[in-house]
């Protein structure tokens, strides 16, 4: 347990050093995603900024920002290590590769949170978005991110086998922007599209967060109507399936002898 904690701490420290070293790039990312939000709000508001609509959009957009950072994160790391020829060293480490991977995911969550907070603070100050902060939103956000991490493992596994998955990562994060209710609540979708949207990793989390933060519902309320229960089941399935697929792809890459080849 101590070794797992140290690995997580080291991976987080290393990633924070990288973020600080390339802080100009981080700043450009913050500006980019802020511009996307402002543009989407302007278009959805027919040329105006409506306070209620801004809050609804803001909640979904913040969750999508995590997806935007995390989805290509693992695959990008694996690709960089394969290009540098150091990927096999991860599997030769005394610590299990699974523990190292867990540490990297944890580190990505920390750095993603920094990026999200910077963007959120800037948008709140610029657009005067009113959003009540409630502690009930924290466990819901954590559950949503657990499912999202499982989803990123699927793409990470695909990277071990197919090597170049950047286009796939772009496709997925753009799909999640438009099909998960991050821009528009899914109750405005056609029935068939809403059913598809509910299978995606962050849709249920966005819905529950809006109920808690915007509608003032309690955890017991979203538990009693099964929304929170379904979120727990949904995220657990994504995490388990993502882990199984990653290990399966890892086995394929080892069998082919292409684990560290690019």
Image (spheres, rainbow, N blue to C red):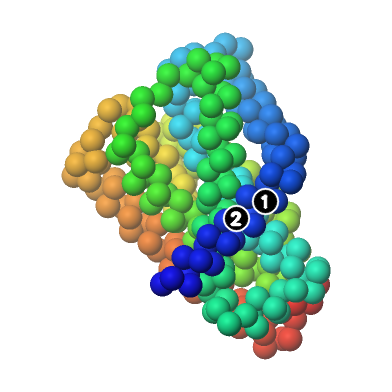
State yes or no: discs 1 and 2 in contact (Cβ < 8 Å): yes
User: Residue 42 occupies which quadrant of the picture?
Assistant: top right
Q: Secondary structure at mark 1?
A: helix
Number of marks present in the image shown: 2
Q: Is residue 13 above or below residue 34?
A: below
Give the Cα distance between marks 1 and 2.
Answer: 6 Å
Which residue carries the number 1 mark? Answer: 17
User: Residue 133 occupies which quadrant of the picture?
Assistant: top left
Dot 2, crowdedness within 10 Å: few (<14), some or many (≥20)?
some
Asked if residue 36 lies left or right of residue 129, the reply is right
Q: Secondary structure at mark 2?
A: helix
Picture residue at 57% right of the left edge, 56% below the top: 12
Picture residue at 62% right of the left edge, 80% below the top: 93
User: Residue 40 occupies which quadrant of the picture?
Assistant: top right
Can residue 155 be seen in this snapshot?
no
Point out residue 234 in the picture as x, y percentages from the top left corner: 38, 57
Picture residue at 32% right of the left edge, 32% below the top: 134
Which residue carries the number 2 mark? Answer: 13
Q: Is residue 2 above or below residue 35?
A: below
């Amino acid at each position: 347990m101590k070794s797992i904690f140290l690995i997580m701490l080291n991976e987080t420290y290393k990633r924070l050093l990288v973020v600080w070293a390339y802080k100009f790039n981080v700043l450009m990312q913050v500006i980019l995603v802020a511009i996307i939000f402002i543009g989407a709000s302007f278009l959805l508001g027919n040329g105006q900024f409506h306070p209620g609509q801004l809050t609804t959009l803001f909640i979904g957009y913040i969750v999508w920002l995590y997806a935007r950072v995390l989805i290509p994160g693992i695959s990008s790391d694996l690709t960089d290590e394969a290009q540098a020829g150091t990927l096999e060293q991860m599997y030769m480490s005394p610590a299990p590769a699974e523990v190292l991977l867990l540490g990297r995911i944890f580190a990505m969550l920390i750095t993603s949170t920094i990026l999200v907070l910077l963007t959120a603070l800037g948008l709140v100050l610029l657009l005067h978005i009113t959003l009540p902060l409630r502690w009930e939103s924290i466990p819901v956000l954590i559950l949503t991110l657990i499912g999202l991490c499982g989803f990123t493992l699927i793409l990470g596994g695909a990277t071990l086998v197919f090597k170049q998955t950047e286009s796939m990562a772009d496709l997925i994060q753009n799909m999640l922007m438009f099909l998960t209710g991050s821009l528009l609540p899914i109750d405005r979708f056609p029935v068939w599209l809403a059913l598809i949207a509910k299978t995606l990793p962050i849709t249920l989390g966005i819905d529950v967060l809006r109920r808690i933060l915007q509608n003032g519902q309690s955890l017991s309320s979203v538990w009693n109507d099964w929304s929170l229960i379904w979120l727990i089941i949904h995220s657990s399935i994504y995490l388990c399936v993502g882990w199984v697929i990653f290990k399966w792809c890892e086995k394929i890459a080892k069998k082919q002898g292409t684990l560290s080849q690019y």
